[in-house]
Amino acid sequence: MSGKAAILVTGGAGYIGSHAVLALRDAGWPVVVIDNLVTGFRWAVPDGVTFVEGDIEDQPLVEATLRAHDVKGIMHFAGSVVVPESVENPLKYYHNNSAKTRSLIESAVRCGVPHFIFSSTAATYGVPETSPVREDSPQRPINPYGMSKLMTEIMLQDVSKAHPMNFCALRYFNVAGADPQGRSGQSTAGATHLIKVAVEAALGKRSHVSVFGTDFDTPDGTGVRDYIHVSDLAAAHVLALEALMAEPGRNYQLNCGYGRGFSVLEVLDAVDRVTNMKIERKMEGRRAGDPPALISDNQAILKAFPWEPRHADLDQIVTDALSWERRLSEIRGE
């Protein structure tokens, strides 16, 4: 063992959680994963990582795990993430993302876990009044997904005042790509992320890519988003953990993005470039609640942590996503 404290990763068999597990392991941290495998995959957890199949709402299981491994930090990724589904089934999101997280935080307090890192989202800002979006922009979610995540941020603020626990909430922008070494990637069937959908189309798994909205007030009329490579995002979590441990009285609520955006058409052009082929594009109407542009102001995280994005190139993000999609076909025997 490295002498470092054990870290619990909830949802560690999922997309972003599995990359955080890899980043922690690469940095020498002992890792324990809890995942109910509803959307995660057992094979996504590397050999040598303690895996507990279960739900974060199962307090006896969670607390036994925290105590058995003397866990000193939690990285919390478990939850539901599909915005349209949250509108159709809000109670699912308030249960999975808010109520279950409350249960997890209570278990952490009971077991004296001093550090908590939360996977939040730019969806907590709703439709921002300004772009790029700063951390002090009003948080006015326009869907239950964003609201369920904001509720957790509020819970963590309150708990950190009442108990010896500090936290970091990282507000993700559009996460994409896959581990450059091919160890993990976005594996969920029916995922709605644009780059995932586009590489599936490039490999013949989809007939086309739908472009939702061509009349936004953006340079080419399509929505502009800040795409961040999942491995850079995972690296930010490890730095957040180190920062929380170095200054136990301090909390962070930070944007995670590159501070620049690409339109839907620019992303599809990048996929065409990388694959040297043309994906069929189907122009459709806007989806409810889609802002024209969502770009992070990332100055705060660059000042707070020694974070240096290493994969901030759209073509590389697409290349890594494509490589993973091919590998996933082999894993599944497609």
Image: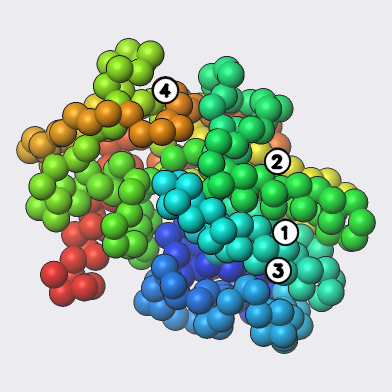
Amino acid identity at mark 2: Gln
Q: Earlier in the sequence, mark 2 or mark 4?
A: 2
- Of discs 4 and 1, which sits in the foreground? 4
Q: Measure the alpha-carbon separation of dots 4 and 1.
A: 33 Å
Mark 2 and mark 3 residues within 8 Å of each other at the beta carbon: no
Which amino acid is tagged 1? Phe
The answer for how far apart the CA atoms under marks 4 and 3 are is: 35 Å
Which SS class for mark 4? loop
Q: Position of residue 122 (x, y in %)?
A: 55, 37
Going from N to C along the chain, the mark reached first, 2 or 3, is 3
Local crowd size for mark 3, using a 10 Å CA cut-off: few (<14), some (14–19), many (≥20): many
Q: Are marks 4 and 3 in contact (CB under 8 Å)?
A: no
Distance of label 1 from label 2 (alpha carbons): 12 Å
- The residue indicated by pointer 3 is 104
Q: In this orientation, which residue lies closer to the viewer: 161 or 21?
A: 161
What is the spatial separation of the Cα atoms under label 3 and label 1, in whole angstroms? 10 Å
- Where does the C terminus fall, quadrant-wise? bottom left
Residue 244 in view here: no
Residue where numbered disc 4 is placed: 292
Task: Locate the N terminus and report the quarter of the image it occupies.
Answer: bottom right
Mark pair 2, 4: CA separation? 24 Å
For label 2, the crowd category at 10 Å Cα-Cα, with few meaning under 14, some 14 to 19 and many 20 or more, is: some
Residue 22 lies left or right of residue 192; in this view the side is right
Residue at 55%, 36% in the rendered image: 142
Graded by Cα atoms within 10 Å as few (under 14), some (14 to 19) or many (20 or more), the crowding at tag 1 reads many
Which residue lies under the disc numbered 2? 253
Q: What's the amino acid at mark 3?
A: Leu
Q: Are marks 3 and 1 in contact (CB under 8 Å)?
A: no
Left of 190 or right of it: where is 135? right
Q: Are marks 2 and 4 in contact (CB under 8 Å)?
A: no
